[in-house]
Image (cartoon, rainbow, N blue to C red):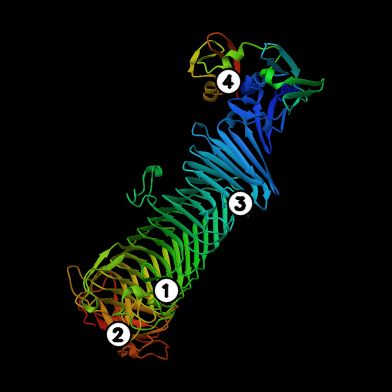
């Protein structure tokens, strides 16, 4: 009985941890303007110097030369996470209860090294909770 | 319990859907799709309106044919290649995209790993193409899954191999359970194998792999090969069926090799300059040229001239499993080495050590042998079963004239010019002095039998049963030899210490030592031919010593027996023997049998007569009594004989009397 409860608890926890939804793809222009588009049925195609993004809401065209970046977002906003991901900056990794795991050269190295679990990662300026599957 | 089930159902209904919302960005470049999970993608910068970079993988936007987001679940460190006709679709997990350069031409796919790659990638290959190939190059270990792949390489684009892994690390080849895979290489290529792996190949899982090699080998690895569980069928090869270096290890599964132009399985030493490392602990850094059979079934059929079923530059070590090898190729002249070569079931340049398993070796070509090694051949194990049959005659060639059933005298013939068929040959006898009658020799290796059930049958002209080119020792097991020529022969001393040895030689000595012969135990029945051929024969100038054992030796003659410390008395007589005859010994006027022997069914009598002169036995018996056997000189010894006492030897319905002595004057 205890084992079953434990199994269910782990099941719920694991499902919850992997439930991060990235409902938006946020485009940032070189001028700093951001545009969040729903990812449902989203396709992109390059046409000459333009990027045409199509989703269930319609089409959106971006001038490629004016696009700085794009990134997934859970709520349509751009978080400070970009500073962590974008730079090859060292990151500190902690467990969710605050235990220090280690210092990694960058986020990619950290995610490739860490075992499955939920971690808080920071580059000194920004922090982000991540799930390693 | 019902509450728990309800709770579980609740969880399934409301929580699982969340996990199904994994968004993935797919970037298609032609037939290659790079898949980036949203949680990994991070910031994806555009540069100058021409480049998009995702997880450090830069895409030239003009090359991108499509980008879309879906809910595909992506497994890190994976690449899949799905072949269909003349195309192949490649999918690359985003986390390793930056480390891979993917190219393709129709269904020919090339993937080059960068030197920065630091994680193992699993490449899963599936589908069918009649003109495709898979080439992977890298320097980090990898896994290749064959998951229902039928691949014929017809035009040799990146390589002529069907699957070519130009990677010197460990390559795990998973023949996915339940799948059948077939590889055929391009005859126009220059590849070393239809499946070529530069590094070490570890075959696993329970699928089936069929391989055809139209240029050289079917399967070639530059380093070791290990096989576990899977079924590998080599159906055609210009060269060897399987060729590897360092070592070969089979622990389970099944390998079937046929249709090859050279050897079935060949293992060489990779670093021939440094030489063999010998076997190492857990095979770590081993470069021995050894072949290990620890389980599974290995079936090999070779028909090429001079081909070997298993050929090892190092040792052949069999501890378990089933090995069946049939060679049908004749002998052949090797113009490079300027000597004859002959087919052989199992061949080692070093040692053969068999401690278990069931081994069946058949050879029908001229000069064909069952098993041979240049050093020590050791057989042991209560459950070891070895059955060897050769039917070929002697092969002769001087480079211009050859004879596949040579019957001439070889006494003064250079050994490079002929190959004698044999069941087992162990050790090396090397000429070190002048030639002809004055030649001197050095001896190496030898043969040791400590156990097992060993049956050797040879029927071709000049075919010996078991031969050691140095000493020969039998201390256990059941050894049965039926041979055309000598049954058991040693170039130097022979030691028979135990076991049950039954030898019938139709045209020569049954057991022949070209130095001293020492019998100290076991049961020995030796039936030589008639005339000058012996049951037991030691070389001229050497002696036969008997200090124990239960022995019946019969032939046209027997070697003289010299007395030594602990000599066991023996009896000599001329008796008639035929298959099925029981020979027994009892103290004269006693009904207590000291020993008895059953003449084997394969014995047809001394073909050249012998000196049959039966003595009148007790009770008025004597003479052949209508038996069909030929006369034979017999030596009999067993425990309990007293020197000087007279014993009754009963053979069939006849009997004779003989006095025991520790010496015997024969030939």
Distance in Å between CA atoms under marks 2 and 1: 25 Å
Mark 1, other Cα within 10 Å: few <14 / some 14–19 / many ≥20: many
* Dot in front, 4 or 2: 4
CB within 8 Å, label 2 to label 3: no
Marks 4/2 same chain: no
CB within 8 Å, label 1 to label 3: no
Q: Viewer-proximal residue, B218 or B291?
A: B218
Q: Viewer-proximal residue, B418 or B646?
A: B418
Task: Pinpoint residue B619: horizontal percent, then vertical percent.
Answer: 33, 88
Task: Pinpoint residue B141: horizontal percent, then vertical percent.
Answer: 50, 38
Distance in Å between CA atoms under marks 4 and 3: 38 Å
Residue B148 is labelled as none
Q: Secondary structure under badge 2? A: loop
Q: Viewer-proximal residue, A109 or B584?
A: A109
User: Which residue lies at the image location 63% right of the left edge and 34% below the top edge?
Assistant: B92
Residue B532 is labelled as 2
Distance in Å between CA atoms under marks 1 and 3: 35 Å
First of labels 2, 3 by sequence position: 3
Q: Which residue is mark 1?
A: B367
Distance in Å between CA atoms under marks 1 and 4: 67 Å
Task: Pinpoint residue B630: horizontal percent, then vertical percent.
Answer: 38, 88
Distance in Å between CA atoms under marks 4 and 2: 86 Å
Q: Residue furthest top?
A: A125
* Dot in front, 2 or 1: 1
CB within 8 Å, label 4 to label 3: no
Q: Secondary structure under badge 4? A: strand
Q: Chain of mark 1?
A: B
Q: Which residue is mark 3?
A: B208
Q: Which residue is mark 4?
A: A117
Q: Secondary structure under badge 3? A: strand
């Amino acid at each position: 009985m205890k084992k079953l409860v434990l199994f269910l608890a782990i099941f719920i926890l694991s499902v919850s941890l992997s439930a991060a939804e990235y409902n938006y793809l946020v485009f940032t222009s070189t001028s700093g303007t951001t545009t969040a588009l729903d990812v449902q049925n989203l396709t992109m195609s390059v046409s000459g110097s333009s990027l045409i993004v199509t989703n269930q809401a319609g089409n959106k065209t971006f001038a490629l030369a004016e696009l700085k970046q794009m990134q997934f977002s859970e709520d349509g906003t751009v978080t400070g996470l970009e500073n962590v991901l974008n730079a090859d900056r060292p990151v500190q990794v902690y467990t969710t209860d605050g235990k220090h795991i280690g210092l990694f050269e960058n986020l990619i190295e950290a995610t490739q090294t860490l075992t499955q679990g939920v971690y808080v990662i920071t580059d000194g300026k920004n922090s982000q909770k991540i799930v390693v599957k | 319990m019902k509450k728990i089930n309800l709770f579980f159902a609740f969880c399934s209904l409301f929580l699982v859907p969340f996990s199904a919302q994994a968004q993935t960005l797919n970037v298609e470049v032609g037939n290659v799709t790079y898949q980036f999970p949203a949680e990994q993608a991070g910031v994806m910068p555009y540069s100058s309106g021409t480049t998009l970079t995702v997880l450090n993988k830069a895409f030239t936007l003009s090359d991108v044919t499509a980008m879309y987001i879906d809910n595909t679940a992506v497994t890190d460190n994976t690449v899949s290649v799905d072949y269909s006709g003349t195309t192949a679709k490649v999918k690359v997990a985003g986390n390793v995209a930056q480390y891979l350069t993917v190219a393709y031409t129709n269904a020919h796919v090339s993937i080059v790993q960068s030197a920065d790659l630091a994680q193992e990638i699993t490449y899963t290959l599936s589908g069918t193409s009649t003109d495709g190939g898979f080439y992977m190059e890298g320097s980090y270990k990898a896994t290749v899954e064959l998951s229902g792949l039928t691949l014929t390489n017809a035009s040799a684009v990146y390589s002529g191999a069907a699957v070519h892994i130009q990677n010197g690390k460990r390559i795990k080849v998973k023949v996915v359970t339940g799948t059948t895979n077939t590889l055929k290489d391009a005859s126009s290529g220059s590849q070393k194998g239809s499946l070529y792996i530069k590094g070490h190949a570890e075959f696993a899982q329970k699928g089936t792999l069929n391989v055809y090699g139209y240029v050289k080998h079917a399967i070639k690895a530059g380093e070791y090969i290990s096989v576990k569980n899977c079924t590998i069928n080599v159906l055609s090869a210009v060269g060897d069926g399987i060729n590897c270096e360092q070592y070969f290890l089979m622990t389970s599964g099944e390998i079937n090799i046929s249709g090859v132009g050279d050897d079935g399985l060949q293992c060489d030493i990779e670093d021939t300059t440094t030489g063999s490392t010998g076997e190492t602990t857990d095979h770590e850094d081993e470069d021995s040229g050894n072949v290990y059979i620890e389980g599974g079934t290995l079936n090999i059929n070779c028909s090429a001239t001079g081909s070997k079923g298993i050929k090892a530059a190092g040792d052949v070590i069999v501890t378990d499993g089933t090995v069946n090898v049939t060679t049908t190729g004749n002998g052949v002249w090797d113009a490079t080495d300027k000597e004859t070569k002959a087919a052989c079931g199992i061949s080692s340049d070093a040692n053969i050590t068999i401690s278990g398993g069931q081994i069946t070796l058949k050879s029908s070509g001229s000069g064909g042998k069952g098993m041979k090694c240049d050093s020590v051949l050791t057989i042991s194990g209560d459950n070891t079963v070895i059955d060897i049959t050769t039917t070929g005659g002697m092969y002769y060639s001087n480079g211009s004239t050859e004879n596949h059933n040579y019957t001439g005298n070889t006494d003064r013939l250079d050994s490079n010019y002929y190959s004698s068929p044999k069941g087992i040959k162990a050790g090396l006898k090397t000429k070190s002095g002048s030639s002809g009658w004055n030649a001197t020799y050095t001896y190496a290796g030898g043969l040791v039998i400590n156990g097992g059930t060993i049956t050797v049958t040879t029927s071709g002209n000049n075919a010996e049963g078991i031969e050691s080119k140095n000493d020969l020792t039998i201390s256990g097991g059941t050894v049965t030899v039926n041979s055309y020529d000598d049954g058991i022969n040693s170039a130097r001393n022979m030691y028979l210490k135990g076991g049950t040895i039954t030898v019938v030689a139709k045209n020569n000595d049954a057991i022949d030592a070209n130095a001293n012969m020492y019998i100290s135990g076991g049961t020995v029945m030796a039936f030589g031919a008639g005339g000058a051929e012996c049951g037991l024969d030691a070389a001229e100038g050497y002696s036969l010593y008997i200090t124990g054992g239960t022995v019946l030796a019969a032939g046209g003659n027997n070697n003289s027996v010299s007395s030594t410390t602990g000599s066991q008395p023996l009896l000599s007589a001329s008796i008639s023997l035929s298959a099925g005859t029981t020979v027994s010994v009892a103290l004269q006027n006693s009904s207590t049998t000291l020993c008895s022997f059953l003449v084997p069914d394969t014995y047809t009598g001394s073909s050249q007569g012998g000196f049959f002169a039966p003595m009148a036995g007790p009770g008025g018996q004597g003479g052949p009594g209508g038996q069909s056997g030929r006369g034979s000189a017999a030596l009999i010894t067993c425990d309990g004989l007293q020197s000087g006492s007279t014993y009754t030897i009963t053979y069939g319905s006849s009997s004779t009397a003989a006095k025991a002595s520790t010496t015997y004057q024969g030939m």
